């Protein structure tokens, strides 16, 4: 990502475009996040400050995060000083992620005073300061004591000190000669690293983009550019790149395969392939962090279930490994029966107290003399019977261990399918349904002391092919069963990715012929919502619903089928989403 000083400049310009802005409400949804509800001439807006060292940012947002039951003390302080205040100025420390918001406020005496809200968004030193008219710190989001190793203390009552100014060059002040100097002087070997060392206010992503634009490679080496022709072209290209994108910035982002923004910047991101342009700089940040925070929160909420299922899989694999070792030992049981026959044939040779019987092995062609250990506490007949008894025990153990391994394999397959569902769950309700499935299977204990709000059952995901044929996709194992054996008609078409865990997919055609395009698109959905997603050339089995049978005494979602055909598809999200209008429409 590239939330650098110049991207912050673009965001502040969008905030400045709002006219006659007043602070209406203030909330603090989390420890590091403050939300100002603003009222302006054209309506209302929300300004988010996130002083989180892992994701510092400042932008307008449409999100409405849940607030704690009791507002934190810093939030109460901001309400006291800034509620009703009018935003009169926004400034930024040169080439730094530090923004200063000045408000006209009314103090306790009814006089008009100016107070400032300073957002420092520089990595580990992220903080949010409320300053008095004299420049003293009224309070801050993260207090830093005088005895700590930090260069600047941050405590109420102290004079606020601006961060140290950036000593690197401003690319807006550079021209062709400066870039020629950058290329010809000694420094880092890579062009992108040399730009990072000498130019301020830019992220590594932008420096790599500049290297790609100017030299054709993000890892371009300066030594390779020092020919008279190339160095001149590179210097001109660098000047053109920064002049164009710093004076005419635009919000660009590169999206992952599932459509989630992975990188953003104020210029096109060409190093990863094609990029897309967003509506505004704030909207891009809002989309990027809202989706990321939602996924992180969902991942954390499902972490307990995921860990439980992973532990169950680990224990089951360990148990099956022991059973396989015991099963291997049963394969040599025939020798026990042979030893029993040899002992029976030589009972007359066994003396009282003897522990070793030496006898001819008549199962060996050479009739070699072997030593057979026997117990001196048992009679000769009992020693022979013990070998036969061990042989019978091994024979029965083979049958039971084989059965137990088959059951274990079935259970492990089921648990791995649940783990795949947890990784693909897109909402809390889906997580809750998976929890209920595990509770019914006895894998997770029900929360007896905690009452859960009863929620309506989620319907399967619904899509439409380009021919207008409905296609349904199950979200979890229980829903797969319900979709295949209750909702679908016997003459509908059933699809599933071959030999991997995944969703059941139904083409609701009611026995009517469907086009190859519809089958292909349904197969792409089956491949996309399967464990093999991300791969290529995924085989997907296609068969009428009437050919699909529930596995006898099987776990939820497990089926068998024999008559089918297989299609090979690529589960690319852009192929799946675009033609199928994949907003996951509910029934």
Image (spheres, rainbow, N blue to C red):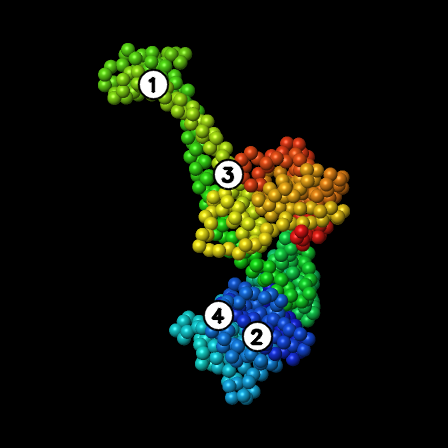
The secondary structure type at the circle numbered 4 is loop
Give the quarter of the figure containing the N terminus: bottom right
Q: CA distance from mark 1 to mark 3?
A: 38 Å
Q: Is residue 400 above or below residue 439?
A: above
Circles 4, 3 touching at the beta carbon (< 8 Å): no
Residues 333 and 443: in front is 443
On the image, numbered disc 1 is attached to which residue? Answer: 385
Q: Residue at x 48, y 30 (%)?
A: 403
Quarter of the rendering containing residue 478:
top right
Sequence order check: which comes first, mark 1 or mark 2? 2
Q: Position of residue 267 (x, y in %)?
A: 66, 64
Outermost residue toward the left?
353
On the image, numbered disc 4 is attached to which residue? Answer: 70
Q: Position of residue 418 (x, y in %)?
A: 54, 45
Residues 302 and 456: in front is 456
Q: Position of residue 266 (x, y in %)?
A: 65, 66
Q: Is residue 369 above or below residue 5?
A: above
Sequence order check: which comes first, mark 4 or mark 3? 4
Q: Which mark is residue 411?
A: 3
The secondary structure type at the circle numbered 2 is strand
Residues 547 and 517: in front is 547
Q: CA distance from mark 1 to mark 2?
A: 89 Å
On the image, numbered disc 2 is attached to which residue? Answer: 25
Sequence order check: which comes first, mark 2 or mark 4? 2
Q: CA distance from mark 4 to mark 1?
A: 78 Å
Q: How many marks?
A: 4
Sequence order check: which comes first, mark 1 or mark 3? 1
Sequence order check: which comes first, mark 3 or mark 2? 2
Q: Is residue 227 above or below residue 74?
A: above
Residues 341 and 247: in front is 341
Q: Is residue 141 left or right of residue 276?
A: left
The secondary structure type at the circle numbered 3 is helix
């Amino acid at each position: 990502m590239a939330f650098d000083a110049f991207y912050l400049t673009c965001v502040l310009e969008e905030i400045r475009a709002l006219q006659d802005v007043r602070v209406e409400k203030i909330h603090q949804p989390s420890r590091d996040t403050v939300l100002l509800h603003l009222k302006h001439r054209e309506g209302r807006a929300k300004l988010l400050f996130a002083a989180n060292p892992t994701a510092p940012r400042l932008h307008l947002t449409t999100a409405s995060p849940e607030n704690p039951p009791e507002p934190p003390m810093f939030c109460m302080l901001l309400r006291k000083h800034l509620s009703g205040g009018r935003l009169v100025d926004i400034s930024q420390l040169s080439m730094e992620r530090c923004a200063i918001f000045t408000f006209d406020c009314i103090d306790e005496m009814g006089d008009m005073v100016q107070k400032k809200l300073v957002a420092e968004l520089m990595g580990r030193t992220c903080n949010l300061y409320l300053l008095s008219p004299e420049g003293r710190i009224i309070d801050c989001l993260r207090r830093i004591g005088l005895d700590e190793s930090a260069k600047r203390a941050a405590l109420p009552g102290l004079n606020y000190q601006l961060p140290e100014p950036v000593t690197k060059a401003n690319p807006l002040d550079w021209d062709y000669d400066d870039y020629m100097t950058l290329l010809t002087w000694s420094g880092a070997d890579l062009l992108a690293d040399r730009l990072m060392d000498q130019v301020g206010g830019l992220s590594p992503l932008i420096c790599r983009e500049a290297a790609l634009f100017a030299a054709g490679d993000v890892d371009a080496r300066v030594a390779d550019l020092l020919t008279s022709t190339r160095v001149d072209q590179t210097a001109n290209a660098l000047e053109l790149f920064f002049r164009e994108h710093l004076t005419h910035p635009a919000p660009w982002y590169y999206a992952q395969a599932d459509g989630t923004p992975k990188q953003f910047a104020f210029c096109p991101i060409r190093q990863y392939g094609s990029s897309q342009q967003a509506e505004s700089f704030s909207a891009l940040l809002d989309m990027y962090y809202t989706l990321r925070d939602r996924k992180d929160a969902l991942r954390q909420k499902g972490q307990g279930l995921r860990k439980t299922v992973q532990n169950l899989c680990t224990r089951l694999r360990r148990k099956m490994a022991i059973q396989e070792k015991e099963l291997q030992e049963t394969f040599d049981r025939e020798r026990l029966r042979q030893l029993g026959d040899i002992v029976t044939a030589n009972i007359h040779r066994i003396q009282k107290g003897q522990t070793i019987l030496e006898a001819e092995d008549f199962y060996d062609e050479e009739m070699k003399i072997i030593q057979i250990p026997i117990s001196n506490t048992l009679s000769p007949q009992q020693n022979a019977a013990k070998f036969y008894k061990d042989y019978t025990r091994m024979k029965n153990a083979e049958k039971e261990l084989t059965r137990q391994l088959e059951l274990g394999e079935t259970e492990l397959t089921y648990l791995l399918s649940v783990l795949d569902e947890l990784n693909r769950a897109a909402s809390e309700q889906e997580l809750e349904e998976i929890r209920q499935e595990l509770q019914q299977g006895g894998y997770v204990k029900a929360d007896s002391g905690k009452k859960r709000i009863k929620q309506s059952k989620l319907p399967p995901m619904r899509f439409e092919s380009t021919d207008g044929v409905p296609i349904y996709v199950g979200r979890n194992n229980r829903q797969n069963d319900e979709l295949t054996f209750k909702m679908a008609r016997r003459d509908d078409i059933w699809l599933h990715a071959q030999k991997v865990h995944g969703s059941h997919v139904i083409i609701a055609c009611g026995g009517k012929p469907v086009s190859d395009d519809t089958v292909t698109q349904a197969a792409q959905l089956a491949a996309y919502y399967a464990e093999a997603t991300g791969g290529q050339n995924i085989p997907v089995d296609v068969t009428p619903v009437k050919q699909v049978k529930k596995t006898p005494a099987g776990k939820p979602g497990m089926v068998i089928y024999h008559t089918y055909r297989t299609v090979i598809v690529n589960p690319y999200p852009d192929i799946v989403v675009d033609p199928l209008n994949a907003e996951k429409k509910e029934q």
